[in-house]
Image (tube, grey):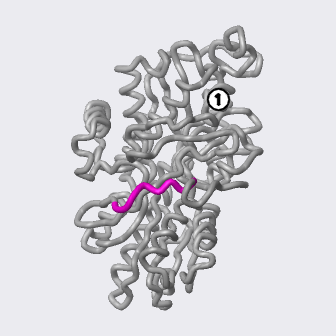
């Protein structure tokens, strides 16, 4: 489901969080307060950061085929508004968050990244959404030595590539997510036949490839594959083709708009009733609701953060704080939309990474995001923490399966630490 034009306009119009102005330029061509203080931080980049402010830039599809993701910065903004007003910012620095719309178009993402770095003089790019857009920008960002923090894509290359040290992901990578689904099928349907719908880009191929490797050696077989392009008007023809395979399982590897279409097409087909597994990025309630909750009963996915619709978290301190502050700082937004919860969680993760930086510099943030040691983020599921290292660029590697029942997702099984269950991913 797409964010409404009114919703996108409201988000775009309010996404600059109040902050003190940055000034000056340092020897590296950056702004802010010149070079860092004497000592080990001397000479490091201080563009976009002063003793009282920090300027971040985000790139999202506020329009286009992936515009449902345009809700995420609404949750980020609410978090930073709260931290600025009630927590004296991050270490005394008020956060300014400037958001640009790339329409889910990689060339546009490059244009916006350049604008944020060269014109807006941001300290860091915080969240670049989508595998295609992030792939298009990360060479430039790393050449400029600008932190590209917690990109909103689970592509495995963000954690395995050693040539882009300034870029790091946040959410579980797609290969690990695929492993979770493979493990579930091995236990519940060890002889399953699987039909796969996937987006024809690095995102779709990453998850599909991970799934194929995870089922290797088992009795599970992929019997049909159909890809789609982000420019396609509908995936209904692909789902019809997959239905002809009579597979036991439909693995739906798609972004929100197409995830919703695939669920609707599956529901229409009364002669095919596969177990429908939908990947996490298309599992939001905003994707399922247009299909009709009665048509998505029993579908399976996996998650790593708390669902604001789940009564399990009704008395959870972080969920109560989130809903109260969303009401206070973003009263026009529905806090039960999980994309806002995602935004809140990743903003809190940025705050913790910045607090851990030994130097308030770009280099300090780069090193901090590669040295997270079981950092607790209260909006993540219990048992899920941020952990990275010199040879581990994946902050979150744990997920829990969930099944849709009634009008919400229900968690089942235990949190799966994919590092322990399957071993680390390497380049």
| Crowding at mark 1 (Cα within 10 Å: few <14, some 14-19, many 20+) | few
Q: Based on the displayed image, in which of its 4 quarters is residue 118 positioned?
A: top right
Which residue lies at the image location 24% right of the left edge and 72% below the top edge? 294
Residue 277 locus on image (x, y percent)? 43, 71
Q: Is residue 107 left or right of residue 251?
A: right
Which residue lies at the image location 42% right of the left edge and 57% below the top edge? 400
Which residue lies at the image location 52% right of the left edge and 47% below the top edge? 396
Location of the C terminus (image quadrant): bottom right
Q: Is residue 63 above or below residue 126?
A: below
Residue 151 in view of the camera: yes
Q: Is residue 401 left or right of residue 121?
A: left
Which residue lies at the image location 65% right of the left edge and 45% below the top edge? 392
Q: Is residue 157 above or below residue 254?
A: above
Q: Is residue 365 magenta?
A: no
Q: Is residue 177 left or right of residue 168?
A: left
Q: What is the span of residues highlighted in magenta in the rendered image?
A: 412-419
Q: Is residue 319 left or right of residue 93?
A: left
Using the image as rendered, state which of residue 324 and residue 8 is in the foreground. Answer: 324
Residue 175 locus on image (x, y percent)? 59, 61
Q: Is residue 415 magenta?
A: yes
Q: Based on the displayed image, in which of its 4 quarters is residue 77 positioned?
A: top left
Using the image as rendered, state which of residue 184 and residue 421 is in the foreground. Answer: 421
Q: What is the secondary structure assignment of the residue under circle 1?
A: helix
Location of the N terminus (image quadrant): bottom left
Q: Which residue is mark 1?
A: 119
Q: Is residue 403 above or below residue 187?
A: above
Residue 1 in view of the camera: no
Residue 280 locus on image (x, y percent)? 45, 59
Using the image as rendered, state which of residue 381 and residue 280 is in the foreground. Answer: 381
Residue 334 locus on image (x, y percent)? 28, 45
Q: Residue furthest top?
A: 38
């Amino acid at each position: 489901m797409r964010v409404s034009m009114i919703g996108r306009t409201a988000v775009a119009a309010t996404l600059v969080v109040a902050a003190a102005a940055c000034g000056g330029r340092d020897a590296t061509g950056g702004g802010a307060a010149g070079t860092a203080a004497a000592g080990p931080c001397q000479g490091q980049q201080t563009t976009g950061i002063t003793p009282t402010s920090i300027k971040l830039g985000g790139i999202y599809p506020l329009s286009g085929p992936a515009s449902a993701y345009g809700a995420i910065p609404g949750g980020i903004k609410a978090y930073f508004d709260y931290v600025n007003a009630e927590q004296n910012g991050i270490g005394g620095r008020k956060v300014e968050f400037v958001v640009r719309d790339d329409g889910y178009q990689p060339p546009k993402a490059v244009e916006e990244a350049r604008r944020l770095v060269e014109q807006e003089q941001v300290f860091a790019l915080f969240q670049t959404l989508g595998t295609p857009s992030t792939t298009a920008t990360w060479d430039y960002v790393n050449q400029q030595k600008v932190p590209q923090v917690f990109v909103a894509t689970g592509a495995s290359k963000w954690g395995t590539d050693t040539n882009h040290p300034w870029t790091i992901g946040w959410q579980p990578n797609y290969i690990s997510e695929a492993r979770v689904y493979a493990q579930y099928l091995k236990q519940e349907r060890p002889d399953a036949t699987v039909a796969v719908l996937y987006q024809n880009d690095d995102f779709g191929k990453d998850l599909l490839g991970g799934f194929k490797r995870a089922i290797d050696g088992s009795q599970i077989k992929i019997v049909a594959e159909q890809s789609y392009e982000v420019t396609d008007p509908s995936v209904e023809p692909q789902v019809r083709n997959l239905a002809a395979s009579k597979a036991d399982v439909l693995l739906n590897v798609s972004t929100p708009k197409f995830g919703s279409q695939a669920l609707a097409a599956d529901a229409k087909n009364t002669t095919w009733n596969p177990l429908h597994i939908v990947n996490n990025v298309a599992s939001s309630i905003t994707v399922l609701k247009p299909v009709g909750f009665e048509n998505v009963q029993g579908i399976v996915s996996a998650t790593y953060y708390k669902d604001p619709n789940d009564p399990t978290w009704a008395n959870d301190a972080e969920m109560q704080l989130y809903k109260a502050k969303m009401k206070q700082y973003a009263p026009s937004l529905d806090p039960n939309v999980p994309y806002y919860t995602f935004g809140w969680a990743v903003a809190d993760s940025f705050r913790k990474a910045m607090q851990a930086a030994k130097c308030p510099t770009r280099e300090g943030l780069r090193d901090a995001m590669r040295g997270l040691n079981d950092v607790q983020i209260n909006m993540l599921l219990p048992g899920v923490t941020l952990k990275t290292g010199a040879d581990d660029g994946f902050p979150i590697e744990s997920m829990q399966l969930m099944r849709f029942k009634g009008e919400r997702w229900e968690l089942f099984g235990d949190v799966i630490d994919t590092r322990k269950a399957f071993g680390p991913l390497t380049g």
